[in-house]
Image: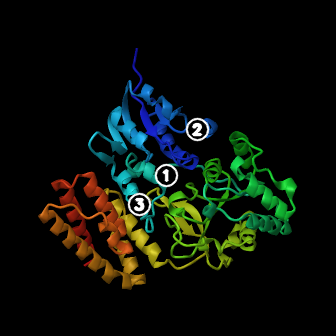
Amino acid sequence: MIARPAPSLVLQMQRMGDLILTFPLLARLRHAEPERPVWVVAEERFFKRLMPFAPDVVFFAPKAAPKLAGRGYRRVINLSHRPDAARLCAELDAEERFGMIQGPEHTAINGYWQLYRASLVHNNRHNRFHWSDLNLLDLVAPRDMRHMRLPRPKAAGQGRVGLFVGASEAEKRPTPQFWADLALALARKHISAVFLGGPEDKAISAQAARLARMPGLNLCGRFGLRAFAEFVQELDLLIVPDTGPMHLAAWLGTPTLNLSMGPVHAWETGPAAPGHHVLRSNLSCSGCWGCSRAEFICRRAFTPARTALLAQHLLQDPKRLASLRLPGLSLYSTDRTEQGLFDLRPAIPSRESSRDLLGRFWQAWFLERAQRPADSQGALRDLAACAPRLLPPLRRAIAHSTRHCVQALRAGTALPPSFWEARPPLLRPLTSWMQMYLQNGRYDKNAWEHVIACLEDLDRLFR
């Protein structure tokens, strides 16, 4: 009897949206090695409802962890930041481990891209990598990334629109008044819309329906997840904040318009597949990790009238999108780069900001460090041509950081905890990663040599 290959085990014990963003990885593992089982540890309340739409994998609840310890695995991929997931990743018998691993004396992160992801905590301003891609990059070769296929949205139909009113945090969703006014604005354009949401969103949806005087259009809480998935596939457009059902709708091929507001970064958690649309604020703080203001000012530019007009164009005449004027907002279409990575392309022509250009540079630089195709020199030339004022402070910050690191190495000391955050924001993608890398390597000689070599390479690039 031929033994079955050892399974690949994925630990994804976060929210529903995080689990759905793991589906491309699960699909890739199944495609690359069809004979190898793929097992997933996830929260039961999520995976039980998502199983009909997930790739062909076997799910386990976290309580099954003791039973998982009795066998060997080809690889264990920990995509969670929970301590129990890190302990489980360390305890299991596996040929390869990725993600956070909590040993008896030291917690480490295996995988270049898993370490990069960890460096983004409160530091994701210039990040241009999507969470679903970061799940894949340690395991999928560049050539295979380019050939990955994600579900594309269907063509628009008769104008059936869903308004998903909920999100996990209040700052990530519009107000009930916004949803009511949007439903009325759509009705004036002869577009029918219904209010949707989960059981926890019933109060928001009921208030919106009452304000709009449209109680009959309130379908919030009437569907289980399977029925919701079937219903949403009949829609021509889902207008939705950053939430798990948005990722499910995109995975199922429903066109989505993501209202990206609050402490969410569309580059990280927008609809992952090509062909969807993202509307976000033009404020420089857009995409923050956590809002520090008394009011969520990023929501001000989102108005029902503008959103209704945009929805009308998406449904009836997408070619006219480029002529729209949306003050204070930017509209993007989701796409994929030549490398197969997530991309946000302006749907309304606009000049790239210095923040956009800096983000593109850091994306290319980190790709090249991982021996993946990119052009950091070209990205730097674009930055120098459009935002030359950024180059002198960048050079100074690189030189200062190099001196600081050399002094610490000679003194045999670790970098202070505030090291990465004390650098200018335009250099923090590097300094946060450096600090994580050194901590991960316990400040040994190899870790120091690698970090200083990276600084020297960067210094040469900026000369």
Q: Which residue is mark 2?
A: 47
Rendered position, 326 above or below 67: below
Q: Which residue is mark 1?
A: 132
Label 2 to label 3: alpha-carbon separation: 27 Å
Viewer-closest of 220 and 188: 220
Rendered position, 381 above or below 258: below
Any mark on residue 120, and which? 3
Percent of width and height locating residue 292: 51, 70
| Lower position in the chain sequence, tag 1 or tag 3 | 3
* Amino acid of disc 1: Ser
How many numbered marks does the figure carry? 3
* Amino acid of disc 3: Leu
Label 1 to label 3: alpha-carbon separation: 15 Å
Q: Residue at x 19, y 59 (%)?
A: 448
Percent of width and height locating residue 348: 61, 74
* Amino acid of disc 2: Phe
